[in-house]
Amino acid sequence: MFYLMIVVFILGYTIIALEHPLRVNKSGTALLLAVAMWVLFNFHLPVRLPDTALQAHLGDIAGILFFLLGAMTIVELIDSHEGFRIITDKIKTTNKVKLLWVISIISFFLSAVLDNLTTAIVMVAMLRQLVGDKKERWFYAGMVVVAANSGGAFSPIGDVTTIMLWIGGQVTATNIILKTFIPSVLSMTIPLVLLSLKMKGDVQKPARVAAGHGFSTKPLERNIVFFLGIGLLLFVPVFKTLTNLPPYMGILLALGVLWVVTEIMHKSKNDAYRPMVTVAGIIRRIDTPSILFFLGILLAVAALESAGHLELLARVLDQHVGNLYLINVIIGLLSAVVDNVPLVAGAMGMYQHSFPTDHYFWEMLAYCAGTGGSILVIGSAAGVAVMGMEKIDFIWYLKKISLWALIGYLAGAGAYWGLSVLGV
């Protein structure tokens, strides 16, 4: 059963990757994969699986899903009030290359103060106001994934794995920024330059449709919802620091505040208008299949973690590779397929007593686990969210983005190694 689990996991991932030619929705495949993995794991054990093991994983996964649901709802609420016009109206360029650089740089730095998942959701909503053609928008969305993951990697609050290392005491906030900023910039800039060489001409902006529902919001309403929404999203990491509660509690707080504010704001509006601009109506438009896809993928990976596959992998790397720089590079490559959270958790468990705080192993682990997920669209939370929102095809991303993301990832890893050897 141990080896059969690996075979089933690879088969399931292959079907997900071939979603477009097979015409089988990836969400259904992911759910079937999750259940199959846990059934095999259950029969793999000498005794039946205690409920607490699955419940422990489900609790962690539910936190991510609630965070995703809350962030998507907030972004959709801002969009329904035409809030992103405050930014998009200031982006005047229609030149494809200039727009790509603007979007990427915003994504990079926004991800450092929000997180890569929320940033990806926000930026895709903005892209829909800037790029009309769907296939053209995919290039920008792909670069958003790369930039958001890169920006999240150098910040102690920008990526869940960096947060894990920071809270666990493996890295300090100042040091992780200083040591991984240049590699993170390279992991974004190199794909950005390479993609820029392939793009020419101007983008066609979409026709303006008032808030997507035939009504136009007032400027005051638009400003209140935009600035309050963005401010509450920025407050989430602050809330976590102040209360030590998980990030999804901060998102639920933000969603609750916006819910009440918009209900009061639109209480005098007619029944036809209110569902278009209040949470009760907007939450029905959230892409539920994408959330279920995320649930399936994370449950499937959790089965591998519980069965010991990831721990075994970590030990194999330790015994047969040895070089800590190379181990981190391999972990980053694996995070393109397997969720980076259990990979980092496994590395922390193995090496927590071996290396002190701010050792180069922890710093490079933060970089590699954070940026390696960009190589495949399903390799990071940001990629999964963008894939769901824009219906990006796995094979398309593999052909058009993956190679450039891989080159940027390896360049950043090489830069970190070089700077570390030089003692910089």
Image (cartoon, rainbow, N blue to C red):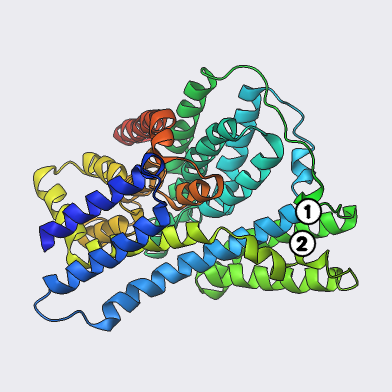
Judge left or right: residue 419 versus residue 289. Answer: left
Looking at the picture, how far across and down is residue 67, in whole percent? 53, 65
Above or below, 422 against 257 in this view is above
Which residue is the site of mark 1? Answer: 213
Quarter of the figure that contains the C terminus: top left
Secondary structure at numbered mark 2: helix
The answer to whether mark 2 and mark 1 are in CB contact below 8 A is: yes
Q: Residue at x 40, y 30 (%)?
A: 408
Is residue 354 depicted above or below 66 in this figure?
above
For the question of whether residue 272 can be seen, the reply is yes
Q: Which residue is mark 2?
A: 276
Mark earlier in primary sequence (2, 1)? 1
The residue depicted at 22 percent of the width and 44 percent of the height is 327
Q: Nearer the viewer, residue 422 or 227?
A: 227
Residue 288 in percent (x, y) is at 53, 61
Q: Quadrant of residue 4?
A: bottom left
